[in-house]
Image (cartoon, rainbow, N blue to C red):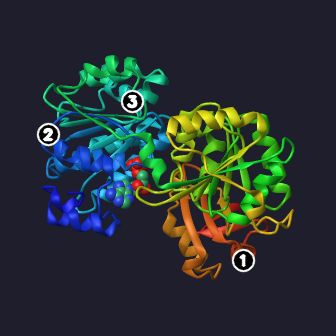
Amino acid sequence: MTSFASLPLSDAFLANLETLGYSTMTPIQAESLPPVLEGRDLIAQAQTGSGKTAAFGIGLLYTINPAWFATQALVMCPTRELADQVANELRRLGRSIANLKVLVLTGGSPMRPQIASLEHGAHVVVGTPGRIRDHLSRQTLDLSSIRTLVLDEADRMTDMGFYDDIAAIVKECPKRRQTLLFSATYPDDIRHATEAFLADPVEVVIEAQHTSLTIEQRFYEIGFDSRDETVARLLRHFKPASAIIFCNTKVHCRELVDTLRAQGFSALALYGELEQRERDEILVLFANRSCQILVATDVAARGLDITDLEAVINADVSKDAEVHVHRIGRTGRAGGSGLSLTLCAPNEKKWVKLIEEYQNTPAEWHELSELDEDDPGHGDPAPMLTLCISGGKKDKLRAGDVLGALTGDAKLAKEHVGKINVTEFQTYVAIDRRMAYEAFDRLSAASNLAGDFGSFKGRNFKMRFIDV
Ligand code: AMP
């Protein structure tokens, strides 16, 4: 029953799912896909990491007619990051559909290229409510052919004040359509607010507890003054390739990052008031393995769509059990397992009690003495180092050009070049740290300018390392 083959999907579509490594459905997929493929409306309560994107993604791709160049599906998301992530997942899921066009419409990017792409036609539009409404009011987006409408993370969208935009957008969609609504929490006001958008929906609830079954949770009792040192010790013992460390305050975040960096760890802090550009850069460094550790407050992590981490460390116990479950849900892939480590000083025991009650399982306490003998001050640097090139899409620079220069002028083997992110004005490329400096010297020697320039596609661009 949990095999994708039990669904009425084409052989090509199923074969593609297999290449993506999706063999069995996650609980949210198993419960929602059968009614969704029958055309029913759906309200689903599910967290990030549950496989919810594929749950609505497969649903909407099922009804797309690629030969018809009209916008047939619209997905609304709260943030730009999430919209990008959803669009990427849809493209991966839709690889077996020839010429499928998925377009992202979010704020913070110029309008004109978006309008040009819309003129070329997009089968699926993924975007944030503000920007979608902008396009509607300029009449550059036509929603009269929508068959599937998805509201992803509806609770966050309403929290962020998007309700009126959403209502205005829904009005522009045909009455005969399928509507799928996903929300991590489901308070009454969302239920009331959004009821009008759905017709006789099937309701699916995947308990937060489900995810915690696959997450190994360990609690450690610590003294009042050994918190940051113990975080470093846990990192040295478990050596997670990627981890988020949660702190209850911004002040603690900053302090912990300083401690970790002083010990040689590649750690960056994420807190509320960073500029979008700084935030984007940190996320690039984290995703391309130039930074292994993010130290974050709950507020800052809220808009973050990072899951699939090897470990989550709670440097402070959350006072809210639901927040705790949300934090640890970022480790462990759908179906895989993850590790969550929580440090608890005597005054925090009461919060652990709440977590035990909420999860209906006793906390599993571990002794610090179980950890390897410690060697303070020795953190590992990240495996990759990011080279930032001051040219991007605006300069018509493409990932292939950068890869060409790195394997050509810089004489790197392909496997020593990691992720390449081309943004509007800049390009970030991760390079194996062990050969990064040599590669840089070869690049700048090959350009005929003095200083830190490299030649890409026959043009010189300034470049620098971002060391974490
Ligand atoms: P989501 O909850 O949509 O953010 O998905 C969490 C992660 O699980 C993503 O990295 C998906 O690619 C992955 N995923 C989704 N469905 C499956 C599945 N059936 N089997 C394996 N991985 C999956």
The reply, left or right, for residue 391 in relation to residue 247 is left
Check disc 3: other Cα within 10 Å, few if <14, some if 14-19, many if 20+. Answer: many
Residue 449: name its quadrant.
bottom right
**Residue at label 2?**
39
The residue to which callout 3 is attached is 154
Q: Earlier in the sequence, mark 2 or mark 3?
A: 2
Amino acid carrying label 2: it is Gly
Q: Amino acid at mark 1?
A: Arg
Q: CA distance from mark 1 to mark 3?
A: 44 Å
For the N terminus, the image quarter is bottom left
Q: Quadrant of ligand 1?
A: bottom left
Location of the C terminus (image quadrant): bottom right
Viewer-nearest residue: 258 or 186: 186
Residue located at (22% from left, 27% from top): 173
Please name the amino acid that badge 3 sits on.
Ala
Q: Residue at x 68, y 65 (%)?
A: 239
Residue placed most toward the observer, 48 or 188: 188
Say whether disc 2 or disc 1 marks the residue closer to the N-terminus.
2
Residue on which disc 1 sits? 434
**Location of residue 104 with respect to 88 vertically, above or below:** above
Question: Relative to 22, is 316 on the left or the right?
Answer: right
- Label 2 to label 1, Cα distance in Å? 53 Å
Q: Is residue 109 visible?
A: no
